[in-house]
Every structure is written in structure tokens, then in C-alpha cells.
Amino acid sequence: MNAPDKFASLLTLTREPFPASTKSAITSARRPDVRVPVRDVLLTNGETVSLYDTSGPYSDPSADIDVRRGLSSVRGAWIAERNDTEAYIGRIRQMLDDGATHADRDAQKLAELRAAASGLQRQPRRALPGRNVSQMHYARRGIVTPEMEYVALRENGKREWMAEYMADAAREKRLAGNPMGAQIPKLITPEFVRDEVARGRAIIPANINHPEVEPMAIGRNFLVKINANIGNSAVTSSIEEEVEKLVWAIRWGADNVMDLSTGRNIHTTRDWIVRNSPVPIGTVPIYQALEKVGGVAEDLTWEIYRDTLIEQAEQGVDYFTIHAGLRLPFIHLTADRRTGIVSRGGSIMAKWCIAHHKESFLYTHFEDICEIMKAYDVSFSLGDGLRPGCAADANDEAQFAELRTLGELTQIAWKHDVQTMIEGPGHVPMHMIQANMDEQLKHCHEAPFYTLGPLTIDIAPGYDHIASAIGAAMIGWAGTAMLCYVTPKEHLGLPDREDVKQGIIAYKIAAHAADVAKGHPGARARDDALSQARFEFRWQDQFNLGLDPDTAREFHDETLPKDSSKVAHFCSMCGPKFCSMKITQEVREYAASRGLAEEEAVVDGMAGKSAEFKAAGGEMYIPIQPAA
Amino acid sequence: MNAPDKFASLLTLTREPFPASTKSAITSARRPDVRVPVRDVLLTNGETVSLYDTSGPYSDPSADIDVRRGLSSVRGAWIAERNDTEAYIGRIRQMLDDGATHADRDAQKLAELRAAASGLQRQPRRALPGRNVSQMHYARRGIVTPEMEYVALRENGKREWMAEYMADAAREKRLAGNPMGAQIPKLITPEFVRDEVARGRAIIPANINHPEVEPMAIGRNFLVKINANIGNSAVTSSIEEEVEKLVWAIRWGADNVMDLSTGRNIHTTRDWIVRNSPVPIGTVPIYQALEKVGGVAEDLTWEIYRDTLIEQAEQGVDYFTIHAGLRLPFIHLTADRRTGIVSRGGSIMAKWCIAHHKESFLYTHFEDICEIMKAYDVSFSLGDGLRPGCAADANDEAQFAELRTLGELTQIAWKHDVQTMIEGPGHVPMHMIQANMDEQLKHCHEAPFYTLGPLTIDIAPGYDHIASAIGAAMIGWAGTAMLCYVTPKEHLGLPDREDVKQGIIAYKIAAHAADVAKGHPGARARDDALSQARFEFRWQDQFNLGLDPDTAREFHDETLPKDSSKVAHFCSMCGPKFCSMKITQEVREYAASRGLAEEEAVVDGMAGKSAEFKAAGGEMYIPIQPAA
């Protein structure tokens, strides 16, 4: 089949609902048009566990989705009712936006791609003259937007079922989290969200030109979020292919997605991604700007960069990574580093600064950038162009000099009511992680921290998703609001579909471990529900409550494929004779009533199970399969 | 081919030396028969990096190995020269030791298995009457044994090459580790090892009947070690199969291996494993004892258990997991737990205690057990039968009551100069991990801590090696001496060969992250060497210095298979235009000499690389492969 069909069918697969799961919604009492999606998992014991859901309409079988038309609007009416924006004739799209020239022999191919996306064209909106449409601006004027209400309902989820698992006061006291300075209320109110956004401690990335987004918050006092990166293929084959990557990432739990595309067709590809994305989309505009000047960093200009910001803001990008903290005077601080500058955007700007012997135009034009950001509500993700690229360079003067500058820029951004988060490392040994959080809180005034890992060691190429999940969990507990994932291919190659999934699962683990450690209300309830299912040998529930039900079921099937095993009161690991949980239950029964008859019954029962187990193979260890 | 041949050939594969690696040794100046193996990795720039090596003679192509004869002795002469042991007619082997009866129809098969292992039979040794042959006993009398000297050399490794990477004083000051109370000297001397063993802060598991072992230390002031579990197949097909599992585990870095076999042929299988193992072997004797009574916990007796201890001590098992801290009065403390008792040995003993309404015979006969341990130098691994099986049960009274009892037992063991370590959890959220270490240090008098994980969350079935590697790294930093691995199959099924590897790599990452955080001298040198190779685009060195060179190389090949790519000054992730490390090097050159010509040369060079990159695919993202 041809490419579009191929990926269309793949997209269908990717849209399959999770097992035993149904899409439902939490609707605001105040405004019925605020409907927050959740995934309800029906357990075999009749309970329902309701989970935070990032997958958007894609996991809803009843949703009619056409990637060539894009998702339906969630926020359109909310934006309109604020009466502070106008539709306008946007910037004229140029061949160069897609990295092509009119003379280009690929012009024909490009024209086709653009035609395919014609149904995704929207007339851009911007703030009316003199107006500021950022969520921070509203928050500071005391306005609780529908977006804030949406976020409040989303962060709380359905607390009813959680409460049942957190009912034991003594247990909750023993397990009380350590928020490490975070101040997480028992219940998130819309007013609390407004206050957090107003003081800059949280952001809601939501460009007015991305009405399809399902609002979410990034902040220390909310659930820890994760970001996944995707990028275009050199020869983009179809809308379906690009959108499928996005859908795959949010299916496994990506709260945000960054489009790191470079090269050809990036403007058109971005249309495809943004129009079909229910999660905020971030970009690094310098990548496209560099393409516009043929890849020669020295040829970059403020005008070309500014034009790129407007181009992407009109498309609906929700946050920009901007390396404005990498200043000319800091570059020499990297001279003695073992791995120098490892940020792509950072190294590009360093080259520009050195070549021109000038201060970075991102720094000198920062207030001009703020003017653009607040006209569309694009959030800053202030990039750490000088982050360490190995343990040996961690926490050095180059890194912290830039961090302090990001703090200064944060205050300028806030002067313009522009939402801002701060990017962080990178490569940091465990014992130096806390210092990163402390310095960030101290110099960046509690603006949300958004870190890449950090990787705790450098000797695990091929397993850096694990080496970094350790650091991510720790810095998430310390207060980092969003964790940028690392895939197993980091440092080695391009992540494929499976690598993306592996990276996301590793980071869902890190983020959840942080939520539990911080004592986020209800965070542990899902663990308790799964553990209860485990103790009661409800195998299906154990699989379905996990981060990846498919893999859990598959692993169980490898040893005990029979359906009967899915209700067996033991598993293949220990077998009935050694099943501690089974024995525990017997001990409890026995302790409860000293009836010997009952005890005998139990033993008989075990004998039965034992035969069953032996029939199933009865092995302590799977015979190894010789390679070839 | 038949099974033995099949696994013999697999064993050959498993014995392949690591790429660019040669086996070499550090020889003691004082006694030339103390020769510690290391793996020397030759880098493409001529440097040699020397690594700690757990793989034994198997990774030495010149070693003549016959698994039916067993490994040659390392310690035989050392044991003999102490003149405190005697060879004796050991316990008579019974059919029941292999879980069979004389009437058994499998008797024939068993006879064959035993015949196959006949070449592995050794006459057992034990301490002369009134003597104590434990390393702790020697240490307390001021004797520095060859084993202690071996450990000292092994912990230091070749410090010369490390020193080069740690030469920058300012950098080392910035990166200085946080030992969290550990006292790690700059150089480990044999006298330091003796002192640590004497005060019980470290153990050297080395049964006098396991002379094949390459001595290693488990202690807070030494490198963090990891343990891997293996177990027999229900129908053991051959010596080769069982030994291959062991060789596979130590190839990837297992410092210790526990044989958790149950069911048939476990005595004979143990002969195969111990005689062919260069690493200490641990067991849980209660498993075999339970087999001897047909799997009925209530039928266990002290006599049967004692007989099993002697049986295994004569075979050369280096440490026994003994759940002597699980006392009758503690069992009711588990009644309100979410997952009760999850330790197999623990639940068996709990059942026995409840059934008989008696105190555990492991507790009442603890001093009798000590008498056996010191006659063979078997070390205690005091089991945590009441460890939590889910986050909700973490750090509860049942767990800590048992831990305090393990502390009492430690002092009794030390009264007999018996080496002792303490087993720990299990399932513990991040914020409750430190308390486990604090309580253990407080109540167990700094005896080495040996933890399973801990798992930081419960919702990651299929990925528990990651959920637990986070906890393992943290508790390793806090002072845990050995980490028991968890595989991706935990809670679901039986680990296969690949699962074992995945579990071990995850735990090597955790252990190394802990060593770096503690500031173990030289620990970071390997990271620096790899990062330097990365910055200098020495791809082969980057692969070969990693924990798993095969996977790293394979991942790189997936995107850029050509050999030329292995020297390319960029990789597939960013390409030449966006390669930060390449740009950094240009910036440095440029900054060094302002010569425009040179700068142009660089740009020309990039153009060349750029073409090369485009030819190689030039993609930012691998096209996704639709699932069938």
C-alpha cells in the first residue's frame, strides 16, 4: 500500500483504546463547556480507577478524526469571548519557510505537500493593539480563565476512588510525602491555579492560535509532567506519518511534545502537527532560522529570527526554546570543559557571537521578543545553551552564569506578563542534582524548571533513558515541573517508534516516583489499586493499571499463556509452593479461624494448584534460547 | 544438535572477549600468587583504560575451561597454609537432596545427571575442632589474609590511568562526592580491608569449600556491588545450560550470584554452579529444606534444616539467606498490610510459626547456626522476611521490628566472628529510602546492607528494573553495599537470558551512579574517558567504554551503518549543521586563531561532511515501521 494508506492504518492501530478502558470526562459545574478527559479503567472486581489522560480524542473510538482537517477546537469560544484578539491576514508564507527556493526542483513536491495540508490552514489571530492575551496577564488581573478551571479539574482527577485507597489515617501518616518546599493543596481550585500562574510559579502553554489544545499546567505544585521530542523525516511522506508520531507519544503519556524538525518542509509539517495536537507544542525557532540562512550561523540576523517567531506564533506553537541567556562573555568559560557546548541552539549562538564579536541578538532584543510572545500567548522556555554535556562539566561557572542570566530575563518576561519556564541540565551526578534545583529556585524566582534528565553517569550508551530516569526522578522530587525525556538512542542515533515509547515509559516512572515522594494528593492511589490487585491475584487488573498493559500481559503470557493462569492464585515465578502472597492469605485465614479442616482444605487446594503449575511448565527459569 | 552441544556452543559465544579488550592482572608485590584480573580496553588514541572485571577466566581466550572438571583453584594454597582445616568424609549424598526418592521413576535420569557431574566432586573441608576459619576471625586477630590483599588490589584497580582524568584540581573540587557518612580512603590498603572486616563493616564471602572464588568485598566503604539471581530449569538439560546462565550473568557485571533453584536436581545443579563460579554463590537453604518435606511448611524441622546447611556448606556456598529475624510475635503486625508477606522464605517461616504456635527455629537455633557458619566461613545474609511488597507497606512496624531483631542477631553472629550482611527492601517510595538506611545503620551496627531495589513505585509492571534502579541508585549512594537486581519480568514471569542482561545493566548503572555520588576515588574516570571519546568523535572508544558495547554499536549502526560514520565528526542525531560538539570545536579553533582562511576551511569542511550526512540519509527521525 502507498505511504498515506500505510500510516493511516498505523494510525488506526495507534488509536486503539487501552484495555478495559473507556474515555470519560469531568465537567465543570460552573461552565459545562469545560470538559476534562479522563481514562476510566474498569477492574474485574467492579471498581473503576480513573486516570489522567494525555491521549486526546485519538483514544476515543467515537471521535471522528480527519488529520487533513485537524482536531476540533476546545478553546475557540473561550478565546473569542475575551474580545481581546483579532483575526488578520497573516504573514505571507514563503517557499523558504519550508527550506526551499522557487528555483528548487523539489518545488513541485512541496506544492503537493502544501495542498495536502490546505484543509489545515487557519487565519491567524493576535492580540488587539495594546492588549496582552497571556494567561499570566489574565491571572494577574484576577481573572480565572476557563483554561485555569480546566487545569484545576484535570489536576484533581476523580478524587472519590482515590480517597478509598487513602482512607487509612495511620498509613497515610506513615507514608506522608516530603514536598521539599512545594506547597500542594489537598484540592486544586481554579483560584489556586490563577494564583500560581499570576506569581509565575506555573504556566499554561496555550497559544491563542492553538485552540485544539487541552489545557495543562507546568508547575512545581502540580503533577510532574514529561515532554517527548519528535522531528520530521528528511523526506516527509505524509501527514499521517507525522501525526502518527505525535499520537504515539501522547498515547504513552507525553504531556508536551517538542517538534525539533529541521531541513525541508518544516513549516508545512508544523501545520500538520499543531492542527492535530491536543497537547502543547514547543519548538526551537533558531533551527528554522538557521535553515533560512543556509545553515551558516554567522549569517543569522535578528530580522530573520523575528520573522520566524511570528511565523511559528501564527501557526500556534505554544512555547519557544530561546537561548537568550548564552551571552558573549560566558563563552570563554566553556574553554576548559571536557565536552564544551552540547546544546544545538547554544552552539549556534556561540558561533554567531564569536564570529561577530557581538552580544547575542536574542539577549539584546529580548524585550522585542516579549512583545511577540504576549500578542499570541507563546510561553518562554528559556534554553540552557551552556548545560553540561558530561558529569565532569556539571555545575560549572558557565552553566550557573547562564542560569543567573535566565533569572534576570525571567523578571523582564514577567514585566510583560509573559509565561516563562527555565530549561535545565543535562548531565549531573546524583550528589550535584539538588544544587541545580536550589540555584534555579534562588535565581529564577520559582519559575517552573524543565530539565533534560539529568543523566547521572556517562558510561551507559544504549541505556541513557535509565541513567537519566534516575536523575529525573530525583530532580522531579526536588521540584522540577517538567522532565524532558531521553531515549535509549541518546548519543547514538535517531529514536524509532519503540525508542520513543521506551523513553516515555521511563519518564512516566520518574515523574510518578516524584509525585509519590512529594506526596501529591492521590498520586499513590493507583499504586495501591495495582498492589491490591496483585495481592488478590487479579492479573488482568494488574496489567491494566500498569503504565504499559500490553507489555505486562505479554511478559506474563511468555511463561503462563493459558487464560486460566490469569486467575491462578500464584504465578510462574515462585509457583504455588513458594507463593508468598498465597501463603500469607492462608496464614490470615488460619489465624482467623483455627479450624484444622479449613487448613487441610487450603493444603488440598494447593495440591490442585501445584498440579496446574507443574502442567504449565513448573520452571524457575526459562530455558535459554541459544543465539541462532 | 543435542542439548549439551547446544549450550556448549552458546557458552563459547558467551565467552567471547569484549571488543578491544584483553584480560590482564594486577599482581601483589608482597605475594605473587595474588593476581587480580582486570579488563584492559585499548582505545583508538593509544590510551588503555583498565576496568574491574567480574567475568572470571571465561573471558580469557587462553583459559582452558571444562565445565565438567570445574574451574581451577584460586585460594587452595591460601586455605592450606593456614593449617586450620581438615578434609573429611562429608555427609552422604541422598536422593532426597535432589528432591527425588529411591522409588522415583526419575532416579535413572538423576543418576545420569550425577554421573555427568562426577568430575566435580570434591572432598569437603571444615575447620579443625575448636578453630574458626572466617575472614572476620582472622581479621580480628590482626591477620591480613591473601583474600584481603586480593580485595585491596581489586578495589583500587589501576589508578594510574584514572589519575590522568582526575588531574584537574579545580574540577575535582567542584565534583567532590558526598559520601553520606562513608569513609573511603584515597587508596585501599590490605590493612584497611582487614580493619573493615574486623569491625563487621565489610564481608568477603569465601567458603573454604569454594577455592575457585575470586575474592571480593561487600561493604559501605568499597565499590557498590550487585547480585543477580538464577535458578534451575524444572528439567535440567545439562551442566552447560546451568553454567551458561552463570557465565552470562558475570559477563555483564554480576559481582555475586544467588542460586534460587527449587524442585528437582538442585543438589547436583549446585555442584555444577559452585565448581564453575569465580564469584561468590548465595542460596536460601529453606527452599531446599522445604523440598525435603514435600513442600509442606509445617513439616519443616530444625534437624532437616541443619542437615541442609551442612550439605550446602560442604558444597561451597558462600552465603546463606536466613530469615531468623521473622519472629512469631511480629507476624500479626502484617495483618493490615496491603500485600502481607512477600518474602518466600519469610512466608514459609510465618506459616510454620503460626501452625505450631512456636517461635521460629531459625531464631531459637541461631547460635547453632553460627557454629556451622564459622566452620566453613559461610557468611550470613540475614533475610528480611517482612520486607514491604508495595509502597503502601513501606517502613511499617513489621518491617522495622524485624530489622531491629536482625541487629540483635548481628551481634550474636559477631560474637562468633561470623561474617554478616543484612537484607533490605523491597518497595519504598523515594522519600522513605533514607530512613531505611538510617535505621539499618543504627540497629545493625554498620553491617553491610544488601537491598532488593527498592522499587519506588508499583505501577510499572514490565519495567520494574527501571522503577527499582531509581531506588537502588539512591540507597546505594546512602550507603547500601550490594544491590540485588530486579529484571523486567519481576511480578510477571520468569526472566529469560535477555531479561537477566537488562536487569544487570540497569543495576550496573545504579551502582556506578552511587559510586560517583559517593566520590569513590577514580569512579568517575571511566565516565570522563567515555565523554572525552564522545567529544572527539572516537565512536569505537565510546562504544567500547560503555557498559554494553554491543548494543551501543548496534544502535549507531541502525542509522549510520557505514564504517566511515564511525569516524564522522557528527552523528545522525543533529547532523553536521547542528552538531554542537563540532561547532564547539570550531569555536575553539576560531577563538584560538582569528585566521579567516582557517574559518573558511572549517566551513568548506562542513559542506563536505554535510554531503556525506545527506548521503547517509540525513534524517532527523527514522521513518516508522508500521506494525505488520
Image (tube, coloured by chain):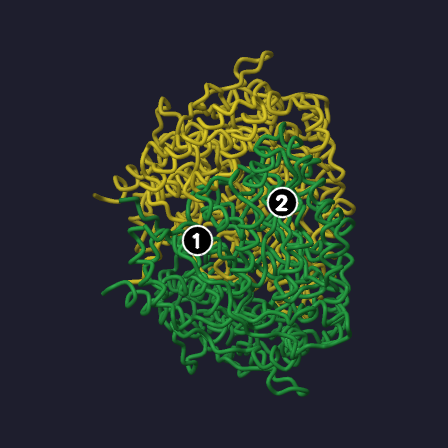
Chain colours: A yellow, B green
Mark 2 chain: B
**What x and y, as percent, mark residue A133?**
62, 29
**What x and y, as percent, mark residue B549?**
46, 67
Residue B221 relative to residue B115: left or right? right
Query: Closer to the observer: label 2 or label 1?
Result: 2
* Vertical comparison of B303 with B92: above or below: above
Please identify the quarter of the rendering in which residue B379 is found.
bottom right
* Vertical comparison of B308 with A602: above or below: below
In this view, which residue lies farthest toward the left?
Answer: A1
**C-alpha separation, residue under disc 2 versus residue under disc 1:** 36 Å
Packing grade of label 1 (10 A; few <14, some 14-19, many >=20) is some
* Mark 1 residue type: Asp
Residue A89 relative to residue B519: left or right? left
Closer to us: A605 or B47: A605
Q: Which residue is mark 1?
A: B499
**What x and y, as percent, mark residue B614?**
37, 63
Please identify the quarter of the rendering in which residue A396 is found.
bottom right
Answer with mark 2 or mark 1, whichever residue precedes in sequence: 2
Query: Mark 1 falls on what kind of element?
Result: helix
Quadrant for the N terminus of chain B, please.
bottom left
Q: Which residue is mark 2?
A: B361
* Mark 2 residue type: Phe
* Vertical comparison of A545 with B153: above or below: above
